Amino acid sequence: MNKIEGRSLQLAYTDVGAGPAVVLLHGYPFNRSMWREQVEELRGSYRVIAPGVRGHGESKVAPPPATMEEMAADVSTLLERLNISRAVIGGLSMGGYVALAFYRLFPERVRSLILADTRAQADTDEGKRNRAVQEEKALQEGMEVIADSLLPKLLTVETIANRPDIVKRLREMMVKTAPEGAAAALQGMAQRRDQTSFLSRIISPTLIIVGREDSITPVAEAEMMHREMPGSRLEIVENAGHVSNMEQPTEFNRVLLKFLHDLGG
């Protein structure tokens, strides 16, 4: 495990392989291990950087809120420390929010974008209330309660019934997340800006991936992003929910590799 440290920053990260840099940002309330299959697939041809965002995994909990802009700035600091000037920036769910914030803040550092199972819209008022309830539960009752409530929304019915290894792996990631880190991220997501009107200004090649059965960020929202982003590519992963990279890693990796190959490196 690698770490960078600063006055208010301590990030754990994976850094393997050689070649063009690809940054993979995990979702809430997971950790960088969710990208295990993608790291293994890409490391032969790419330099793969998978940070643990603040407050998740082995990365330090910072005072709330953990905004998407702060997380994006953390990624920028990490890339500077690693002497990487430009990279493919990809993220799933909350990681996608961070990727969009990174592009807004540091467009010259983005070679291309990967937006997986995410959305451009800000939270609705109801969504903000739900995050506040979830924050209180995390702090008062612990992450086991959060994991049990989220699991049915993250995975397909078939996966939950027939693939206990994925269910166990996902639940363990959530349970190991510090409640304070989860709470800070929930506050940050509730406060995030609406990026819908910004999409048409993104000129970097962009891959949008979504699980066909994603109930949290449905296909319709991925299709909207695709319409608004000139030159973007939309891929729908069958038999997958909100964590399409874990449920269908072979198909996810196939479309990811084709996109990266078409970039010319």
Image (cartoon, rainbow, N blue to C red):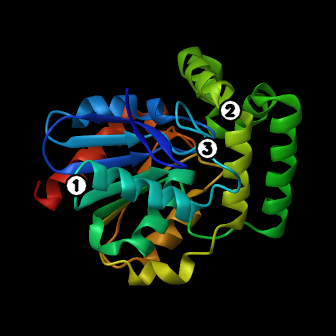
Other residues around mark 3 within 10 Å, as few (<14) / some (14–19) / many (≥20): many
Q: Secondary structure at mark 1?
A: loop
**Regarding mark 3 in the picture, which secondary structure is present there?**
loop
Amino acid type at image mark 3: Tyr
Marker disc for residue 178: 2
Q: What x and y, as percent, mark residue 53?
A: 51, 45
Q: Residue 76's x, y, as percent?
A: 38, 59
In which image quadrant can residue 65 be found?
Answer: bottom right
Residue at the location (43% across, 65% down)? 102
| Residue 106, horizontal then vertical, whole percent | 37, 71
Can residue 142 be seen in the rendering of this structure? yes
Q: N-terminal of the two: label 3 or label 1? A: 3
User: Looking at the picture, does residue 220 appear above or below residue 90?
Assistant: below
* Type of amino acid under label 1: Ile
Label whose residue precedes the other's in the sequence (2 or 1): 1
Q: Which mark is residue 211?
A: none
In the visual, does 139 lie left or right of 151? right
Reading the image, the residue beneath label 1 is: 84
Q: Which residue is mark 3?
A: 28
For the residue carrying disc 1, how many other residues have a C-alpha within 10 Å: few (<14), some (14-19), or many (20+)?
few
Q: Amino acid at mark 2?
A: Ala
- Residue 124 drawn above or below residue 202: above
Front: mark 3 or 1: 1
> Residues under labels 3 and 1: Cα distance?
25 Å
Q: Residue at x 38, y 29 (%)?
A: 36
Q: Residue at x 56, y 18 (%)?
A: 163
Q: Is residue 216 left or right of residue 11?
A: right
